[in-house]
Amino acid sequence: MRGFLLHTLAVMRRETARLARQPMYVVLMIVLPVVSFSFFALLFGQGAIRNIPIAVLDQDNTTLSRKVIRMIDETPTALVACGIQDMAEGERLMREGKVVAVVLVPPFFEKSILSNTQTHLENYVSGTNITVNGLLSKDIQTAVTTFSAGIQLQLLMKKGLTEHQAMAQLMPVRFDKHVLFNPHINYGYYLAPSFMPMMLMIFVVMTTIFAIGTELKNATARDWVETAGGSIRAALLGKVLPITVVMFLVSLVMMIINFKIVGTPLNGSLAVLLVGTLLFILGYQSISVLIVSLLANLRLSLSIGGGYSVLAFTFSGLTFPVMAMWEPMQWVSRIFPFTFYTDIFVDQMLRGTPWVYSLPDLCYMALFIVLPLLCLPRLKRVATEEKFWGRL
């Protein structure tokens, strides 16, 4: 055991010297991650989606038509950017991407309301961005519903009802919605803690593959293993530990940016987040070791590692819920540590879930750490046989 520790320390000293000598490691482990974290902090700085441009075709041009347009413009999401003369102009603006929706106020809008005849407003939404269109349609519908309720309220009060009686008749059943964990619908709270770990994951994978792959490419793998006294376990542990330490420190910068700059709340356990982050880093390092051991090719390993990392976001459930996926795809989502890590992030940051409910996710992530044990014989072979060296 003492010999194993001494050999591991020897490899760590060798790896630390390599990290200091090669600027690429500084770029991959520190510069690019921090830049990407800062980028997403700025990108989601506003938090909520606001002032989406829409066009309005007012074919009535009366006091009430202008009032409903003003109420739509006052909603958080919609911004009445321009008035148009016909629908052909609205279609052109939408195709050019200058507006996302067109609201049509038909002729005789005010006359129909004053004569107690049903009328309508038409809303044409692009539909290309589900999130934007959902929020925009909801706000426009809310504005029109409020306008309609106001008209009905005035009519009932003119019949002698009090405001309270009129409201009870107008809305006999009131629906109250309570958003528990993100009441302001702040996309920064939701997306920044997702995109930042994704960037951390990508750079962990790239750095780990690069660290082992360059040993094969530059034919220094035998020296690496000999520094460990021929023990591939000591060689691997000594190589990945310095990277683990640096990436964990970088993850702390990620959390500081999340909590202090983006303003994401921490309603749960910071200790669970830290343990989860460490397991997240170790899990993706383990996957990287498996990839480069099997392929023994730096360029191909970087490509496969990058593709695997990007797929993790698709299967994480952030854009399309895992529970709504086809069942085989739900199982596929479990081959990515990112799926479990995002659950921990959301639970501990936003929901304030008791730490015990994050234990299953922590255990699932811990399972990925055993992957290098499955490929140690293969790694030793590619590190000691010259036929695997010198590949791009």
Image (cartoon, grey):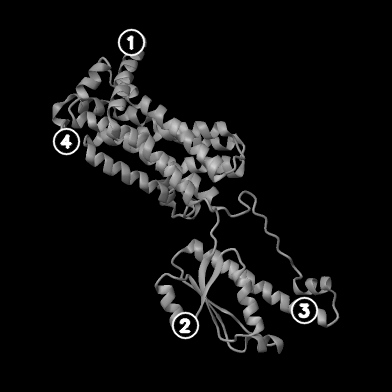
**4 or 1: tag closer to the N-terminus:** 1
Residue that extends furthest to the front in the rendered view of this protein: 82
**3 or 4: tag closer to the N-terminus:** 3
**4 or 2: tag closer to the N-terminus:** 2
Q: Residue at x 55, y 48 (%)?
A: 189
Circles 3 and 2: CB atoms closer than 8 Å:
no
Residue bearing the label numbered 3: 154
Q: Residue 86 at what x, y percent from top left?
A: 48, 84
Residue bearing the label numbered 4: 391
Residue bearing the label numbered 2: 87
Instruction: Give residue 98's quadrant in the image.
Output: bottom left
Residue that extends furthest to the left in the rendered view of this protein: 387
The CA span between labels 3 and 2 is 33 Å
Which of pointers 1 and 3 indicates the residue nearer the eye? 3
The CA span between labels 4 and 2 is 61 Å
Q: Rate crowding at label 1 as few (under 14), some (14 to 19) or many (20 or more) other CA atoms within 10 Å.
A: few
The type of residue carrying mark 4 is Arg
Which of pointers 3 and 4 indicates the residue nearer the eye? 3
Residue bearing the label numbered 1: 3
The type of residue carrying mark 2 is Met
**3 or 2: tag closer to the N-terminus:** 2
The CA span between labels 1 and 3 is 88 Å
The answer to whether 123 is drawn above or below residue 44 in the figure is below
Instruction: Give residue 263's quadrant in the image.
Output: top right
Q: Residue at x 39, y 72 (%)?
A: 96
Does residue 122 show up?
yes
Does residue 336 show up?
no
**2 or 1: tag closer to the N-terminus:** 1
Secondary structure of the residue carrying tag 2 is helix
The type of residue carrying mark 1 is Gly
